[in-house]
Amino acid sequence: MTNKHEINNDDVDDVFIIANNTTTTTTSTSASYDPVAFEKDANVIVRTTAGRIRGRYQKYRSGERGGYYSFKGIRYGAAPIGDRRFRAAVPERSWLGIRDASREGHSCPHKNMILDTFKGNEDCLFLNVFTNQVPKGDYNPEMPVMVWLHGGGYSFGSGNAFLYGPDYLVAENVVLVTLNYRLGPLGFLTAGPSAPGNQGLKDQLLALKWVRDNIAAFGGDPNQVTVFGESAGGSSVQLLMLSPLSKGLFHRAISESGSALNPWALGESSALRASRLAANLGYIGTNSTDDMLRFLKRLPAMKLIEGAPTTLTEDDYRNNIGLPFVPVVEGYWNDANRTIYTESPLITEKPIELYRKQKFQKNIPYLTGYNTHEAMLFIRRLRKNPKLLEIIENDFERMIPKDLNVTTNRSRVTREIRQFYLGTKSVSADSVDEMIALLTDLMFLRGIRRSVRYHARYGNAPVYMYRFAFDGALGLYKRMLGLQRPGVCHGDEMGYLFKFGFFNLNLDPNSLEILVKNRMVRMWTNFAKHGNPTPAHRGDNLINTIWLPINPDSVMDNLSFMDISATLDVRKNPEFERQQFWDYMYEHCNGDAM
């Protein structure tokens, strides 16, 4: 590992080229004013606690006048290699001289979602900072900070600008931080106290500590940090809110299409999957945990990533588990006679138990929601396995949620679920829409709605819920996956928050897409600034609807939410009939819809 950051970017984000390296004078174009106007240097040097870095100024690619400062590939953690593999990372060491921050760092090892090819490097703990103002002299703009946690099922992705371009958000006078965290077995393998699990989440914590200690040097306010994420990033946000380790590191939170209570967000607390991975990769040692971990630490990262799917069993697939390495409850190896932790655990109880005990950060304003057709991702599974519809038709019992705790009368419960969603239809090409609705509820909405109830009822800060229903040209995943069906797929809302590198759309400035994008960006950045997406004290011609927080006294029967489509409408009880059905099922089977 070298001190100078001069690495070749192995990610597809390489196609993103810095657009500008000239000196110009601009002012902000957002609703907030720029208190000072000064020359925008082509190169700017910032001093962090570990050393100096050089960023660059570049023009907006989104049509706004002016530009922003870009600092890419900043190390927040030392390379987690050798004995640090499967362990919490440590901060980057100090350096002499000036490090270049004009290029993004390696993504963490993973397989590309579309191409299914390996990419990345274990030396991957990098973050990027984007800001339209930096301190100058005695002046510091102290702008709110938004820290993005990318999605990808804890298995793939990065924080790089190809998918998460900063242009829209930074133009609203916030500092944006995007980051990489370890993925797959490198980020979430667990095998007892020597590999406790949740390394990827602990990377996120380390990055948030870096933000706390350094963001003022980039014009950010360390006391106004909003952490936000989508899918696995959204469930990460909730897990951080459930962990005592994150106290004081952020002050507002947004989860898009992800909850710690979603069935895919938490794995089995045991070393069995790690043992299965080792065996599948050729381990024939003594079967002691330490010996097995030594074997796994010697393997190339690519071997681990490519071997991860082989650990999935038929029972996993039957239980709709397609993500082999995800967060876990730490401490499962302890018993009444001993308690061993080799590092501070992220969580030591299941998220639902923490919520029931009201052990979460109650003073953090929270915004969360979902897309109308999240489980359109189901189409991708059908393409990979054309027989999947037939398999589900012949084994519909697999649709019973595990946390419904049905031990008897499973056939009756199966019939009730089938009758409600399918009526007289079979599981076939003619009922794909119905299956998308069912899987949207099981995989996403049920857990999101459940966690909203806990935050609103037992928290001390406002909770806002949304339903994203705009099916427009900026939808991300539908374009990536080539889906032609109507509806808003999982991930589609991100195109209305981030500038995507591969979208070369010439949209009419008066189009609905631009209107929805402007409203989304304004509401999300308002929340980062004020803890309220539609603050009443701000006159705003763009947003003429007040987004009401959820009433903590009526979370069971009166959940208010913002319906985001071509218009903004405050409504009650999202997907009412479907969620009423699940409330009935959980009350009947578990005695409690919470």
Image (cartoon, helix red, strand yellow):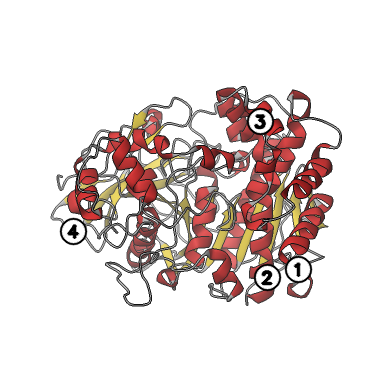
As drawn, 290 above or below 155? below
Name the residue rendered at 50%, 61% in the picture: 239
Work out how far the residue at label 2 is from the one at label 3, CA to CA, in angstroms: 34 Å
Under mark 2, the amino acid is: Ala
Secondary element at tag 1:
loop
Secondary element at tag 4:
loop
Q: Are marks 1 and 2 in contact (CB under 8 Å)?
A: yes
The residue where tag 4 is placed is 93
Question: Percent from the top left, x then y, of residue 544?
Answer: 78, 56
Q: Residues within 10 Å of mark 3 (few under 14, many from 20)?
A: some
> Which badge, 1 or 3, is on the more N-terminal residue?
3
Image depth: mark 2 or mark 4 in front? 2
Work out how far the residue at label 2 is from the one at label 4, CA to CA, in angstroms: 41 Å
Under mark 1, the amino acid is: Val
Q: Are marks 1 and 3 in contact (CB under 8 Å)?
A: no
Question: Percent from the top left, x then y, of residue 225?
Answer: 47, 64
Determine whether, in the image, residue 50 is placed left or right of residue 266: left
Under mark 3, the amino acid is: Ala
Secondary element at tag 2:
helix
Under mark 4, the amino acid is: Arg
The residue where tag 3 is placed is 473
> Which badge, 3 or 4, is on the more N-terminal residue?
4
Q: Quadrant of residue 558?
A: bottom right
The residue where tag 2 is placed is 456
Camera-nearest residue between 213 and 345: 345
> Which badge, 1 or 2, is on the more N-terminal residue?
2
The residue where tag 1 is placed is 555
Identify the image quadrant of the C terminus: bottom right
Q: Are marks 2 and 3 in contact (CB under 8 Å)?
A: no
> Which badge, 2 or 4, is on the more N-terminal residue?
4
Work out how far the residue at label 1 is from the one at label 2, CA to CA, in angstroms: 7 Å
Identify the image quadrant of the N terminus: top left
